[in-house]
Image: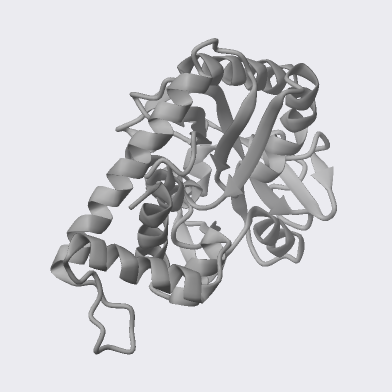
Amino acid sequence: MNIRDFEYLVALAEHNHFRKAAEACFVSQPTLSGQIRKLEDELGTALLERNSRKVLFTESGLQLVDQAKSILSEVKMFKDMASGQSGEMVGPMHIGFIPTVGPYVMPKIIPQLKEAYPDLELFLHEAQTHELVRSLQDGKLDCLILASVAETAPFKEIDLYDEPMSLAVPCSHEWAGIECLEAEQLNGKTVLMLGDGHCLRDQALGYCFAAGAKEDERFKATSLETLRNMVAAGAGITLLPQLSVPNESVKDGVCYVRSIDPQPSRKIVLAYRPGSPLRARFEQLAETVREHLTAN
């Protein structure tokens, strides 16, 4: 057996489909299927239930999948230790980011990172927090750029930016044109929100509920841009993180109002596994991101 066999096994467990697992491993389906059967013969135990049309793992198979994940994680750690000894910003780095951060942060910092570290090969992955956390735990990602939440507590975090949130209202709204608004004025109001799975949803909801506002249950957005367009169409009001807010206080049918007393905010961090040997690289990356964000 070899490392590649473990990768096939883990891919099959993740996708529960031979063709999709083979595509993820960049091999043909017969190749992957044949290697799994060869692994079973070598181990002397059945990993899959052959009498089922679905991909069903035996109890032994599930245990060995977990062990294979651990082995692959250790192999990656070994490679990272070898490549990270000098602390130089070279080689591949897989960075995950959430949808409410990536579109507004990454375009600003990627050109600067490429200029500062031309030998650093960046791989960018966008997903919701729970998916990113799982990928970081499994060793598929090196670090994450996201809002600090309870799910990121097991990781090391480097603070990047304390990001305030502003209220977005239609230009026809009674609050359009005012500079700031106290939280208590939200009492009794209905607010548009992102759908389930977005950590920003929970942060915004917490602030709105504390102020006495409630969620508009008739609509849940999939992105900040959808929220912004709904506000522009006069469908309601919402909270948007500062990095997504334009420099102008009025733009494209939306007026932006600072919410104060208290001001809603979230902490953007760079998270990584506590035992990662790439800590020096993450600190350099964080410093570059921090400097650029605060300068803008």
Q: Quadrant of the C terminus?
A: top right
Q: Is residue 256 above or below residue 53?
A: above
Does residue 170 appear anywhere in the picture? yes
Of residues 288 and 55, the one drawn nearer to the viewer in this rendering: 55
- In this picture, residue 39 sits left or right of residue 25: left
Picture coordinates of residue 249, whole percent (x, y): 79, 38
* Left or right of residue 293: residue 182: left
x, y percent for residue 119: 72, 23
The residue nearer to you, when weighing 133 against 79, is: 79
Residue closest to the eye, 176 or 206: 206
Q: Which quadrant of the view contains residue 118?
A: top right
Give the residue displayed 76% in from the left and 37% down from the top. 107
Q: Note whether 118 is above or below 187 in the view shown.
A: above
Instruction: Point out the residue furthest to the top here.
Output: 86
**Apparent side of residue 184 relative to residue 9 in the rendered image (left or right):** right
Q: Is residue 236 left or right of residue 14?
A: right
Q: Quadrant of residue 250?
A: top right
At which x and y percent is residue 257? 68, 39
Image location of residue 111, percent across then percent down: 80, 29
The residue positioned 51% from the left and 74% from the top of the image is 29
Residue at point 18%, 58% (across, down): 63
Q: Residue at x 69, y 52 (%)?
A: 169
> To which quarter of the image does residue 232 belong?
bottom right
